[in-house]
Image: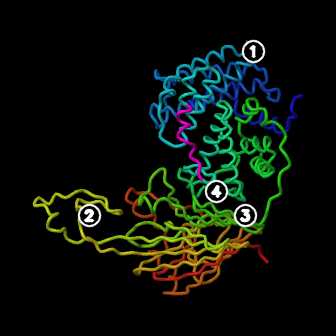
Amino acid sequence: MPFPLDHEFVRAAALAADGSADPSAEFIEPHRALARRVKTLVAAYRSPESALHGSERAVAGALTHLRALRSVQTPSGLFAGGDNVQSPPDSAFTVNDVCDAHVLAAGAGPELADVTAALAEIAGAATASLLTGGVHTPNHRWELSAALARLHRSFPDDRLLARAEEWLAEGVDIDADGLYSERSAVYASIVTNPALLLLAEVLGRPELVDAVERNLTATLDLIRPDGTVETVHSRRQDQRQSFALWPYLPHYRLLAVRTGRGDFARAARLAAADGIHDPDLLAQTLLTPDLARPLPAPDPERLPRDRYLPTARLAAHVSATAHTVVYGGSDVPEHRRIRSGLACNPTFLRLFAGAAVLDAVRLSRGFFDLGPFRAAETERLADHRYRLTQTLTSAYYQPLPKDRRRDDGAYRLVDEGRFSAAMAFPDRPQDEVSHTTRIEVDLRDDGADLRIDISGPSVPWSLELTFRPGGEPQGAVPLGDGRWCMTTEPLTYRVGDDEIQVEAVVERGEPLVGPDRSDVLRYDPGQDYTVAGGTDATTGNRVHLGGHGPQTLTLTLRAGSPA
């Protein structure tokens, strides 16, 4: 007996596919986009819900795109284009879609015989390079392995399976909290989770489904009220971006159907709340029919709730009034550098209060230009209380010992942590200068209480609160260019019927500086950015308050509505 279908979901998926699968258009696109269009056109041809069902135009469009795709396939079988030259993993993305399109086309009858043959030719030309090729990011292993498994599915070859198993033998890089090593919503949803689900199916490896389920479980409490997923802890480029929930839709939906989990069903509904716009979903429903079955009943949202992820040092507290995130998991304090692949975002707090959103709270200190506060330690003091700590240390260097001196003065060029010079720094006695910042955060149902303690030598500091555009800070002094100065007077940021109220009190040290101190009231990204003329500064409505340490400041953040 066939399973019941969620016809509304399938029709919406078909509509999204039809919107991107114009078979009459000529596209000059990268290889990955060409392969995705072919897959979408073949799925539309196969689906009774599509306007292109059985259409000769869909077949002709697919052949046009296939000719373009074959033209960018190099003699190695890898595809030209992009900044990764002769890249097996980048080509694997394309081959995955080519192989899925082959499965769909091969089951459609003689009308798609030419499409099937062209897909087989492209896949065959890429096989040798994917079989021996390497990778350069964690998620590439699983994307490449999925391509090998898909090639085997359509063109059986035990060497393909053996190579995929060789990659999998390294172990899936998922931590105790359910986060992959890159901690990236983009790569979890678009690469790793779909790749592991495919590998589980083709290789008969159910433990790979377990990994996906653990990642989706961890993600549940990272879903923000605006329909995005928290990314501040990511080690990839999405750490500076907002990332929508909808790419998680097929995975939450599939596992909700297969396991009956109501919390996953709720997440799937949230992911589709603004409609279905992913043109690839139609092909996925044909390749994985369970995806088109009706969802189980969703669980109601549980409020309030807390989640702390020790491996990322990230906490979230969610209530009916506020959604607050505290983060202290940057890699920069340990590695002492800004680098692609490290978690570098200096935002340590966010607060959502309906339409009023405090996107980022950051703290700059004028200490040897070593950059903004990034916690090196995070302690969970109680269920809702956290302490973030960073101690910065720099040094002044003494003359070299006699046995380390050179007559020619040609000493080793060494990086001492903030500066490089031909001075053989490790061989010199040094006088250290230290600076410690501690931030205690007490999460409440209506916001958060912060206590910021800055100790060490007297240095300027500036706390920056970046509010999402839509309102204007009331109670602060405008500085121009989307910036304001906050004093000890209360601040209100209101958007529609929602607002965030902020109040600051100096417990120890000098008073806060006034709006005339532009030299203090600024965000400083640190020399790792400025030496290259760059920045990681936020955009939006930025409110600054600042002073000179040593100093202790308390800050109250409250979500509410106008009286």
| Mark 1 nearby-residue class (10 Å; few <14, some 14–19, many ≥20) | few
Residue at x-position 42% and y-position 80%: 456
Look at the numbered disc 1 and give the secondary structure of its residue.
loop
Q: In the rendered structure, which segment of residues is drawn in magenta?
A: 164-175
Look at the numbered disc 2 and give the secondary structure of its residue.
helix
Q: Distance between the residues labelled 4 and 2?
A: 41 Å
Q: Residue 230 carries which label?
A: 4
Return the residue at label 1.
Answer: 109
Q: Identify the amino acid type marked 2.
A: Phe
**Dot 3 or dot 2, earlier in sequence:** 3
**Dot 2 or dot 1, earlier in sequence:** 1
Question: Residue 561, position in %: x, y?
Answer: 77, 73
Task: Give residue 143's quadrant in the image.
Answer: top right
Residue 92 drawn above or below residue 415:
above
Q: How far apart are marks 4 and 1 (CA)?
A: 45 Å
Which marked residue is nearer to the observer: mark 3 or mark 2?
2
Q: Residue 355 carries which label?
A: 3
Residue 36 drawn above or below residue 222:
above
Instruction: Pick the quarter of the image with the N terminus.
Output: top right
Residue placed most toward the observer, 408 or 75: 408
In the image, is residue 172 part of the stretch drawn in magenta? yes
Which marked residue is nearer to the observer: mark 4 or mark 3?
4
Residue 319 drawn above or below residue 235:
below
Q: Which mark is residue 425?
A: 2
